[in-house]
Amino acid sequence: MTAQYPSQLSPSRRDFIKSVGCLTIAFVLGSGADVLAGESVVADELPESLAKNPRINAWLEVLADGRVRVLTGKTEIGQGIRTAVAQIAAEELNMPMERVEVVLAETGRTPDERYTSGSASIETSGMSIRYAAAAARQQLFGLAARQLRVKASQLRLADGMIRTTDGKRQLSFTQLLKEQQLQGEVKLPVQLKAKSEYQHVGKPVRRDEIERMVRAEPVYVQDLRFPGMVHARVLRPTSYGGQLAKLDTAEMQRQIPGLLKTVVDGSFVGFIAEKEYQAKRAQDYGIQHAQWTNGPALPTKQALPELLTTLPAITKRAVNKGDMSGFDTTTAGSAPTAASLSALYFKPYLMHASVGPSCAVALFDQEDNLHIWTHSQGVYPLRNTLAALLKMPPERIHVKAVPGSGCYGHNGADDVAADAALLARAYPGRHVRLQWSRDDEHAWEPYGSAMLMQLDARLDSEGRITHWQNNIWSDTHSTRPGGKPESLLAAQLLAQPALPTPATEVSSAIYRNGEPLYAIPNQRLDAHYVQGPLRVSALRGLGAFGNVFALESFMDELALQARQDPWEFRLRHLTDERAKAVIQRTREMIKNEKLGPGEGFGLGFAQYKNQAAYCAVVAKVHVAEEMGTIRALHLWAAIDAGETINPDGLKNQTEGGMIQASSWTLKEEVLFNEQHVTSRQWETYPISRFDEVPAVTVSIIDRPTEKPLGAGEAAQGPTAAALANAVFQACGKRIRSLPIRPEKLVQIKES
């Protein structure tokens, strides 16, 4: 089967530059005249990505056939960026969306926007494209006014045509730009289209790739096929730090027909074969016959939560408000009118558990250029990292992003790209497709870090929180390569290895959402950075998932202590009206819902990063202790992401976030013994099956006059807390250690 992408992906840097085939336009900003009736919004600050890449033709090109090509440095990881930026560009240019083509992250072609992360695609790239398109529109009007000898105010733009208001004369973009080759930058002021005139933004638009996914048509990097392509697999050590002691490559070559080459560099081992099955056979042979030394034993004598507090730590006081001098957790409840509460919460290692194991295609062409097709979230950082790993000039490396199956953060995408690059260098002239196995993915991907949260608080006689203390122990939440090859798995295995060194500063990702949004006069937050036993990096939401689970579980426990309704308790401690609105909306959403025996409701709330989307989630669960089951029945979410670009996309993101978080909360946990990770297959790392997925309902609070806020990671933390709080209401037992499995209810009963 030939994928759709190969026909669109040119095999060489020279060819893809040739393929641009557009009229490049650049613009000299006009006088600021009123060029489109109804315009009233004048931007006075450029988005960060645009400020770094102000050339307008870095973001937008007008093609020879009059269509517009939009270039974004962000890649598609399920957030629907392709559809959203097409809406934004079509809006500012008054064009049908069908006439807007979107090119995703690709070195040498799209702007360098670093990583697609932090739910920032719309806030950064989307807004940059909005401003670039608006500037383009201004310039098109200026050019048309001069050509038609009319005032710009006498022109209108629609369907890719600029017409005089009397409709007698018109110019297409192509006619307007014929034989012009202009250069310029977007500069302030930029006049944006009046939102009252919007036709595309704010309207639900379905992502066209969804249908192709459902039909199992080629979408992902795993689907790529090229003429003459060969297949590859890698062989991993039996443990972290293990080294290759012996592998009889000659015997392997004799036993496996079609095996083209075995690459051994230190403990990095890869197999290249004509057919994928032959490459898999070589990998299986290596698993059975290669001999390895053991790496250092993993710590298993202590429970992981306890282990985290005993590891050497770097501590940072991230929050220090009011007066905490008199707050002593050992005596906090001794004051005559005070009540105190302390609780310890735990989040285990979680894996990305990508449905499609990581994959990459690499080619060393005849001109010694390296081409990589990857689901990495940062094509430019990956290029720089590969340049350092392979000791090549970055300009000889071309990296193109292609969606991967199941991308929720820094999974194995960069690692498999590096593996493929090493093998392609050893076997130049043909595309090398490297497919990780399920075992490769589960055992070697960088996991979401384990976390321990110690929360202490004091209530006054009115049931208001006066003091709040949070201690968080966690590893880092990001080891993205970012130009440093030592973060790549392959680099650590080479004969001349590049080995990572622990960070020396506390990453803010550890305490992301660790500070409550609630109005609490006296607060302290200490983040303790430790280096845990497993390989870790960014997983959707970073530290926010564990922190919101703890914080919002604790709020419910404090509400109970104060003998107050959990909804009202939260509202009493909030001053942000938008925060209150999402909580109140969820209460409206479930007002007609009834609870049966063994059922409970639970609420969770957060503003992601305390600066992005507001999201409140209500969970309804059923707990049957006698049957040993906890079942998430329904999840409701209210979300405020400011101006909504694509309500359908925002709804998709929120629904997906809740479903994924439900699985994390109720089922998922990476386990290991002294030798290695033991969660190596779906049987040992279960995720929610289709029949376990709860019903989901999302209500969007659209605020078109506010700026758009990142939303892709807003629902996860509130969902975890909502489920924990619902389980408590259903059975009266509080689970503070994820995942919330039925056996933990039994343990509470027995203890």
Image: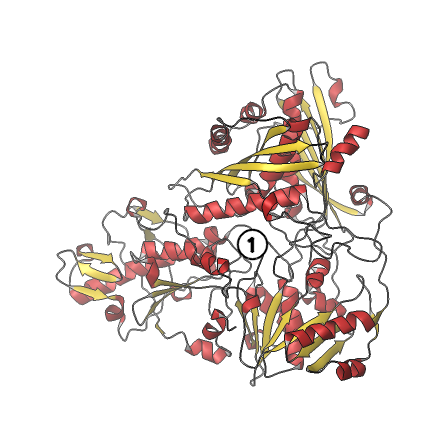
Q: Look at the picture and state if 176 lies above or below 124.
A: below
Q: Position of residue 744 (x, y in %)?
A: 75, 36
Q: Is residue 104 left or right of residue 621?
A: left
Q: Position of residue 335 (x, y in %)?
A: 73, 17
Q: Quadrant of residue 27?
A: bottom left
| Local crowd size for mark 1, using a 10 Å CA cut-off: few (<14), some (14–19), many (≥20) | many
**Residue at figure coordinates x 30%, y 70% from the top left:** 65
Q: Residue furthest top?
A: 336
Amino acid type assigned to the residue bearing label 1 in the image:
Ser
Q: Position of residue 559 (x, y in %)?
A: 63, 23
Q: Nearer the viewer, residue 519 or 595?
A: 595
Q: Residue under circle 1?
A: 117
Q: Position of residue 608 (x, y in %)?
A: 55, 42
**Residue at figure coordinates x 62%, y 26% from the top left:** 597
Question: Which colour assignment does the render follow?
Answer: secondary structure
Q: Look at the picture and state if 113 lies above or below 264.
A: above
